[in-house]
Amino acid sequence: MRTTVNIDDDLLAEIKVIAGKKHASLGDVVDDALREYLAERKQPVVDFSWADVGIEVAGGLGMRPGVNWRSNSAMLDLMEDL
């Protein structure tokens, strides 16, 4: 697709150098750069495991084994049994 964008002169100069070294068109280099940028943005921002998250429970006894605290329906099922 053909479109018009404004690119800073210094950035355009770098893109032209890369295109020349790769024997690629300016558009191909810009496409590759945008694809790489978008792929990085799709990765999770926060990297942690839910298994490492602790829940403080009144009385200090902790959760019963096998309780899935991340599931609303599982928690509601447990509360119905009380």
Image (tube, rainbow, N blue to C red):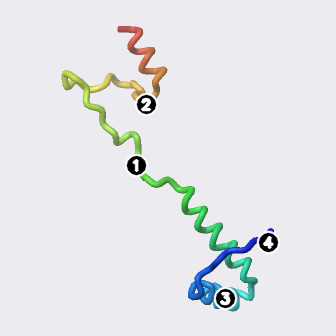
Residue that numbered label 2 is attached to: 70
Q: Which residue is mark 4?
A: 2
Query: Disc 2 versus disc 3: distance between alpha carbons?
Result: 51 Å
Q: Which mark is residue 48?
A: 1
Query: Pointer 3: what residue?
Result: 16
Q: Residues within 10 Å of mark 3 (few under 14, many from 20)?
A: some
**Which badge, 3 or 1, comes first in the chain's sequence?**
3
Is 26 rendered above or below residue 64?
Answer: below
- In this view, the mark in front (4 or 3): 4
Q: Residue at x 42, y 20 (%)?
A: 75
Q: From this view, report whether residue 79 is shown above or below residue 64.
A: above
Q: Is residue 14 above or below residue 39?
A: below
Q: Residue at x 30, y 36 (%)?
A: 54
Rendering coords of residue 41 (x, y %): 55, 59
Residue at 40% x, 28% y: name it: 69
Q: Secondary structure at mark 1?
A: loop
Q: Amino acid at mark 4?
A: Arg
Q: Amino acid at mark 1?
A: Phe
Q: Residue at x 73, y 78 (%)?
A: 27
Question: Pointer 4: residues within 10 angstroms few (<14), some, or many (20+)?
Answer: few
Helix, strand or loop for disc 4: loop
Q: Nearer the viewer, mark 4 or mark 1?
A: 4
On residue 76, which mark appears? none
Neighbour tally class for label 1: few under 14, some 14-19, many 20 plus, Cα within 10 Å: few
Question: Which mark sits nearer the N-terminus, 4 or 1?
Answer: 4
Report the mark closest to the observer, 3 or 1: 3
Say which element carries label 2: loop
